[in-house]
Image (cartoon, grey):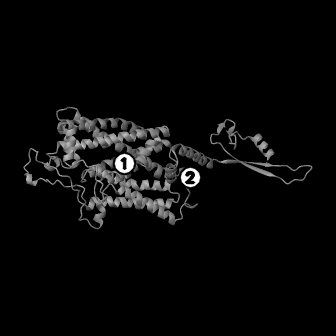
Amino acid sequence: VVGGVCTFYTTLGGMKAVIWTDVFQTFVMFAGMLAVFIQGCIKVGGLEELWNINYQGGRINFFDFDPDPHIRQTFWSLTIGMYFVWLYPYTVDQQMVQRFSSARSLSDARFALICNVPGMFLLITLCSFTGLALYANYVTCDPLKNGDVANENQLLPHFVMEVFQDLPGLPGLFVACMISGALSSISSMLNSLAAVTWEDFLKLRFSSLSERNATKVTRTLAFLYGLLGIGMAFAVKEMGGTVLQASLAFNGSAGAPLVGVFILGACFTSSNWVGALVGGVLGFAFSMWGQIGKYLSLPTNARLPTSTLGCHSNTTTVDDVIMSSDYKINNPDPSLEGLDRFYGISYLWFSALGVIITVCVGLFVSWCTKGQTEKTGKVPDRLRLKMWENICMGLCFPPHILKKEMKQKQLQDQLKDVPSITYTYRQPRSSILILQPLEVTLDVKLDQRASSSDDGPDVKTQADDNNSLADSSSVDKILAKS
């Protein structure tokens, strides 16, 4: 039902419907998660008690600086590895690019991004504290071990139905929260997939279609992708482990080579399309190989100990409960060998590996194919991100000098791309003295702010000294002096 509703309004409304529904769904998500967290805190006796229970249970560990990449979650994997996971959706993801492009101006797009960062931080923090509330309420009775739920993905709905059973309306708010999160993601993806399929594949073959028929095609594509998504939802239901980890792992691995390709094109002048193609394919293959092998070959990660002593139907004795104080979920399995050792790398590192492989292989192949030539094509300097040059300038110059230098460089880059007009003055032969013809050529840069009139284009030119307009009379005066 949820997939059908989302497919319907995305197909008919397009990008505008997606954005406005996302705005409403964001408020619903915040309200639902905040209600669950507050009620969870009340049930355990307050925020301080909630924190103490999680600390004693080993759920709070900010300072694990072990550099071993096989450890599932450490400080390094959650900062560096997660950085590459989030780099794709905030830079080159089609959904985000479409949102940027739909803004009225570049400043509006920047403002929207600046507002998104603290909002996303608050939402993730709220979800994390909701997880702490979940553990604090079930510290003596694990519903998964007790058989109350079938998998981890059912824990939160089970908790909501327990804590909100005496509060009418709040279970419905949480259901709306979950549906809003699903609709927000699905609608953006359907719209993006339809737009990319049309623009990059079908539009080249059906260029004669009218705008109206093209709109019908994109709506049909969105509908078909919606049906495909509904089918995949039934397949994901049978997948072991949490849906969140699977989503982060596979989305990060698929987006990593795309980030690497953009880094190649924007930061390295020696890269060409051959290197970008080979590097992108190998980076994608490597990342997906690692993630698929991890899910198919390795058992589920060991989990922190939980108890069922507080369950009403519990018959387990104390001797059967794990009581190890030095038990650590992040300990890597020493028995892994060969490919299993590679598959044992934390799921958070595969995105970073995909980006690195894409860039390194792309640079090597570009070097083997002689970099940018007339055959492989050259990228204009204005499309380059001069990262290393800007970093060095930022370290060597004060901010006010750096700002002035950057403005001068931008002006020079703009003048390079401005076309020029060549004025040629030919001196006639004198009736008294026999002189050879003299040609004087002046190149005058065209002002890009040229305005057009009814009689034709009124081209403005830029003089060297006083920025005055170079008309025919001024050119004659200059030639006369020369």
Place of residue 458 in the rendered image (x, y in percent of width and height, measured from the top left): 68, 39
Which residue appears at 66% of the width and 44% of the height?
A: 446
- Alpha-carbon distance for marks 2 and 1? 38 Å
Neighbor class of circle 1 (other Cα within 10 Å; few <14, some 14-19, many 20+) is: some
Neighbor class of circle 2 (other Cα within 10 Å; few <14, some 14-19, many 20+) is: few
As drawn, the label of residue 225 is 1
Classify 350 as above or below 9: below
Q: Identity of the amino acid at label 1? A: Tyr
Q: Residue furthest bottom?
A: 338
Q: Residue furthest right?
A: 432
Quick check: marks 2 and 1 in contact, CB under 8 Å? no
Asked if residue 278 shows in the view, the reply is no
**Residue nearest the viewer, comparing 43 with 56:** 56
Classify 17 as above or below 68: above
Badge nearest the viewer, 2 or 1: 2
Question: Dot 2 corresponds to which residue?
Answer: 381
Place of residue 241 in the rendered image (x, y in percent of width and height, measured from the top left): 24, 53
User: Image quarter for residue 333?
Assistant: bottom left
**Residue nearest the viewer, comparing 318 with 231:** 318
- Which comes before the other along the chain, label 2 or label 1? 1
Place of residue 259 in the rendered image (x, y in percent of width and height, measured from the top left): 43, 53
What is the number of callouts on the image?
A: 2
Which residue appears at 56% of the width and 44% of the height?
A: 404
Label 2: which secondary element: helix
Q: Is residue 442 left or right of residue 19?
A: right
User: Image quarter for residue 289?
Assistant: bottom left
**If the image is split into quadrants, where does the N terminus sit?**
top left
Q: Is residue 68 left or right of residue 471?
A: left
As drawn, the label of residue 96 is none
Which residue appears at 44% of the width and 62% of the height?
A: 361
Q: Identity of the amino acid at label 2? A: Asp
Label 1: which secondary element: helix
